[in-house]
Image: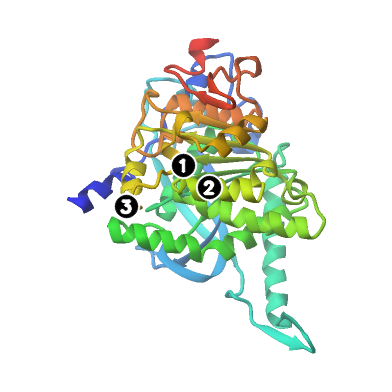
């Protein structure tokens, strides 16, 4: 019975289709592809990925990654196809229809690993009273870093938007699940900038798999921190947009915390050093008390650009997670009235922070409403793609619930225009 209940945390079965058209683009005044580079006007999405999943053999050959852990971080390219041999005009038109006239399944066409960093932790040598990385390993690490920066530079050379959109997935997601979500979102973000997936070793499944994935989140921490610092070091990137889902929210904020603290200790402005434009946490699966300590105790909420948290009291997956952790409320299920007093007060004081209540939105399915629901995906696009703050006066007509706490209503955003 318990294992059956946990199946609602798992991604849906069957072939994935392109997500339902966001409500935003049913209004012809909005053109999602107006700034889409000419070379991106096709039915393929090329995603840059970084992962510490262990490679596995793929049937028929080629690269693939499973749920086991690798001590080394790898990066590469993944190509996702939308539909089967669909010409761009057909893809573009059907991406703006509520009811499509063609099938638009998502298929991973290729995965190519470009580079791999040395195993962690790096071996070190002692020089007097000091310790330093082994020179040979440091040289290999720098070589991989330069290859990564070159790949980023190549990808950004074809777009006027010098921004990276980074997605960190949640519990029980396979590598393919994570790139499908990024393909969905980047397509409707107008195919501008650089789509990036950080895929950690999740996806074992079942109740025991939840525990495995939770500990894999602890394992990946060092690699994610390494990746964030590497991405921020790329000279061609001007801004980074971070999006995390479910358990990935804890994974990402843990790594960002360390990067921010290191930047502070070096006398740098963390927001500038990490190039953070915004941090979005969708259906966060972690303890509200831990979240309060982390965001307020270290003042992280003030150094991550625009910070947005999507919540839903109706999230059944987080209801099971709350039960598993003996009733401790998960951030992703909290209502305005349930916010701890300190968090509610600080939320109201921070003009760059917002919590968005997504319950009852049309198309709400389980735990993944941030991309599968056309109202919520519209708000996410207005935030990440257009840089709009909440409020009708800013072009995001959310319903105010309390200071910097908002609600998405049926038909959003068209119903209030």
Place of residue 180 in the rendered image (x, y in percent of width and height, measured from the top left)? 45, 44
Place of residue 401 in the rendered image (x, y in percent of width and height, measured from the top left)? 51, 21
Quarter the C terminus occupies: top right
Q: Nearer the viewer, residue 36 or 322?
A: 322
- Of marks 2 and 1, which one's residue comes earlier in the chain? 2
Q: CA distance from mark 1 to mark 3?
A: 14 Å
User: Mark 1 — residue?
Assistant: 331
Place of residue 262 in the rendered image (x, y in percent of width and height, measured from the top left)? 72, 60
User: Mark 2 — residue?
Assistant: 291
26 relative to 349 in the view: left or right: left
Q: Disc 2 vs disc 1: Cβ atoms closer than 8 Å? A: yes
User: Mark 3 — residue?
Assistant: 324
Q: Disc 3 vs disc 2: Cβ atoms closer than 8 Å? A: no
Q: CA distance from mark 3 to mark 2?
A: 18 Å
Residue at image point 55% right, 45% down: 292
In the figure, residue 115 lies in which quadrant?
bottom right
Residue at image point 63% right, 38% down: 39
């Amino acid at each position: 019975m318990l294992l059956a209940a946990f199946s609602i945390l798992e991604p849906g079965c069957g072939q994935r289709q392109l997500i339902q058209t966001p409500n935003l683009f049913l209004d012809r005044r909005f053109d999602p592809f107006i700034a889409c580079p000419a070379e991106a006007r096709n039915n393929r999405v090329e995603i840059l990925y970084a992962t510490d999943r262990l490679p596995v053999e793929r049937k028929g050959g080629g690269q693939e990654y499973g749920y086991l852990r690798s001590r080394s971080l790898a990066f590469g390219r993944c190509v996702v196809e939308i539909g089967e041999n669909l010409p761009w005009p057909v893809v573009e038109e059907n991406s703006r229809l509520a009811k499509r006239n063609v099938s638009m399944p998502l298929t991973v066409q290729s995965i190519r690993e470009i580079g791999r960093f040395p195993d962690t932790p790096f071996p070190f040598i002692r020089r007097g009273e000091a310790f330093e990385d082994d020179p040979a390993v440091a040289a290999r690490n720098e070589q991989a870093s330069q290859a990564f920066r070159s790949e980023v530079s190549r990808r950004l050379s074809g777009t006027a938007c010098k921004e990276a959109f980074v997605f960190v997935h949640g519990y029980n997601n396979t590598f393919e699940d994570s790139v499908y979500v990024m393909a969905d979102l980047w397509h409707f973000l107008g195919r501008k900038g650089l789509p990036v997936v950080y895929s950690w070793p999740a996806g074992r499944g079942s109740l025991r798999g939840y525990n495995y994935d939770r500990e894999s989140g602890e394992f990946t921490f060092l690699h994610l921190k390494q990746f964030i610092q590497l991405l921020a070091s790329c000279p061609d990137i001007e801004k980074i947009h971070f999006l995390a889902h479910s358990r990935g929210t804890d994974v990402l904020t843990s790594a960002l915390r360390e990067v921010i603290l290191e930047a502070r200790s070096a006398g740098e402005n963390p927001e500038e050093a990490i190039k953070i434009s915004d941090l979005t946490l969708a259906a966060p699966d972690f303890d509200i008390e831990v979240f309060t300590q982390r965001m307020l105790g270290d003042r992280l909420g003030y150094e991550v650009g625009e910070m947005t948290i999507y919540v839903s009291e109706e999230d059944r997956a987080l209801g099971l997670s709350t039960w598993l952790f003996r009733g401790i409320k998960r951030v992703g299920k909290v209502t305005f009235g349930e916010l701890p007093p300190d968090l509610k007060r600080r939320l109201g004081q921070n003009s760059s922070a917002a919590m968005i209540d997504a319950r009852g939105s049309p198309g709400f399915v389980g735990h993944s409403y941030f991309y599968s629901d056309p109202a919520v995906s519209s708000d996410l696009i207005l935030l990440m793609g257009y840089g709009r703050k909440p409020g009708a006066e800013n072009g995001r007509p959310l319903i105010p619930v309390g200071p910097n706490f908002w609600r998405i209503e049926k038909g959003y955003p068209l119903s209030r225009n």
